[in-house]
Amino acid sequence: MSEKSGCADEVIEEYSRKLKVCGHPVRLQLLVLIEKNEDPCVTDLWTCINESQPVVSQHLAVLKENNIVQSDVQGNRRLYSIVDPFIKQIVDAIIQTK
């Protein structure tokens, strides 16, 4: 445990990694949209932020690879939700300050 932070170094490293992943403006905007909209799909997301579908898909893939979001297939749609509780708290705080 680090004496300076009062928190285990592993915890700090993990939170730091998650913040780096989510710190990109497009990813943070996607996370806010995912949290605010019930079961958004890729089309809903890329049309809301005026980015191309490939760009949005690439950012969503990074969030999935880091276990920040998950996707579920329903019919011909892939729906996204935030699964990381730490990131969900941060996104909720952002939404509340808007």
Image (cartoon, grey):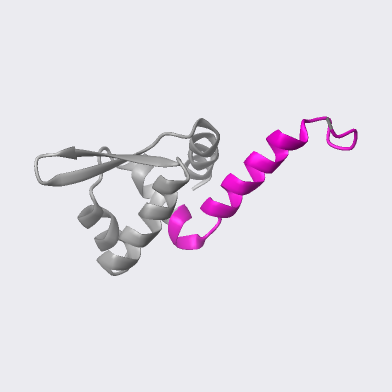
**Residue 13, placed above or below residue 54:** above
Give the x, y percent position of residue 29. 43, 55
Report the residue at 54% width, 53% height from top. 21
**Residue 30, placed above or below residue 96:** below
**Residue 56, placed above or below residue 70:** below
Report the residue at 36% width, 61% height from top. 58
Give the x, y percent position of residue 79. 24, 42
Report the residue at 15% width, 46% height from top. 77
Horizontal side of 77 relative to 82 (left or right) equals left
Give the x, y percent position of residue 56. 33, 61
Q: Quadrant of the N terminus?
A: top right
Residue 8 or residue 28, whichever sits in front: 8
- Quarter-of-image position of residue 47: bottom left
Residue 46 or residue 60, whichever sits in front: 60
Give the x, y percent position of residue 33. 36, 48
| Magenta stretch in the rendered image | 2-28
Horizontal side of 44 relative to 1 (left or right) equals left
Farthest left residue in view: 75
- Quarter-of-image position of residue 7: top right
Q: Does the magenta stretch include residue 15?
A: yes
Report the residue at 59% width, 53% height from top. 20
Residue 59 or residue 25, whichever sits in front: 59
> Predominant secondary structure in magenta?
helix
- Count of marks, rendered view: 0
Farthest right residue in view: 3
Q: Is residue 70 magenta?
A: no
Horizontal side of 35 relative to 93 (left or right) equals left
